[in-house]
Amino acid sequence: MKRIGYCGGTIKTYTDENRNLYISVLRTVIKKELSDGETEIMNYGFNHEKKDYIAVYYGTPNNCELIWKKGDLLPTAPKDIFE
């Protein structure tokens, strides 16, 4: 059985005047087919060092979900998370 997958998209970030960060995932309009058995691991990330964000949202300013706000503790990721 042939497995067909497609390439994903990209990430876009936007910071408003109140230092809120919005993270949106943009999908491609034209899909690129991957070869049989090929996989694509999508690691979305951004450099947040030296930024003083008040909150981080997933989505756009008009359609988003809060995922972190200043003062929230973040759990430590396991060392083998990307192995």
Image: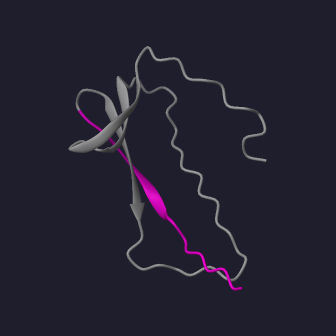
Q: Residue 31: give x, y in percent of width and height.
A: 47, 78
Q: Residue at x 68, y 69 (%)?
A: 39
Q: Residue 70: give x, y in percent of width and height.
A: 40, 18
Q: Residue at x 51, y 66 (%)?
A: 8
Q: Nearer the viewer, residue 37 or 10?
A: 37
**Residue 61 figure quarter:** top left
Q: Residue 59: give x, y in percent of width and height.
A: 33, 46
Q: Residue at x 73, y 32 (%)?
A: 78
**Residue 64 figure quarter:** top left
Vertical arrangement, residue 32 with respect to residue 70, above or below: below
Tell me the magenta residue range.
1-16
**Residue 74 figure quarter:** top right
Vertical arrangement, residue 65 with respect to residue 82, above or below: above
Number of numbered discs visible in the structure rendering: 0
Q: Which residue appears farthest toward the top when viewing the image?
A: 71
Vertical arrangement, residue 72 with respect to residue 10, above or below: above
Viewed as shown, does residue 76 lie left or right of 15? right
Residue 15: in magenta span: yes
